Amino acid sequence: MKVGDLVTLSEVAIGLAPLMSIRKDVRAGQVVGMVTKIYDDGKGRYFEGAKYEIFWFDPKLQRRPLRRQAWMPDPVWKRTDLKKYRPPKKK
């Protein structure tokens, strides 16, 4: 994954307690963001490995950014929380 890629939340992420309320929106393809920054400082404040900052296109999510956990001050994501966005299949 690189800066500029369109992403959405993976099944791992929507299994987290703070994100269960948007599960239907994610599965319907309505939660889309773009990777704006990737950094890997070796040591993580919350977890080790690369951290991804995402700009969410939904205005609701811009006002109150999604967080991996409610107690986290920074809205950063693990790679396993994200997947590349594919538009939903038309019926």
Image (cartoon, rainbow, N blue to C red):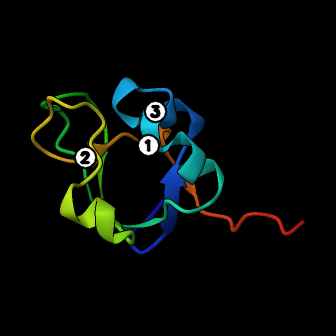
Label 2 secondary element: strand
Q: Quick one: label 2, few (<14), some, or many (20+) residues within 10 Å? A: many
Q: In the image, 90: left or right of 1?
A: right
Q: Is residue 1 above or below residue 80?
A: below
Return the residue nearer the eye: 29 or 54. Answer: 29
**Callout 1, which amino acid?**
Arg
Q: Quadrant of residue 78?
A: top left
Give the residue at x 65% y 56%. Answer: 28
Q: Is residue 76 above or below residue 6?
A: above
**Callout 3, which amino acid?**
Met
Give coordinates of residue 65: x percent, y percent.
24, 54
Mark 2 → mark 3, Cα distance in angstroms: 17 Å
Q: In the image, 7: left or right of 47?
A: right
Q: Earlier in the sequence, mark 2 or mark 3?
A: 3
Q: Quadrant of residue 61?
A: bottom left
Q: Is residue 65 above or below residue 72?
A: below
Mark 2 → mark 1, Cα distance in angstroms: 10 Å
Label for residue 58? none
Q: Earlier in the sequence, mark 1 or mark 3?
A: 3
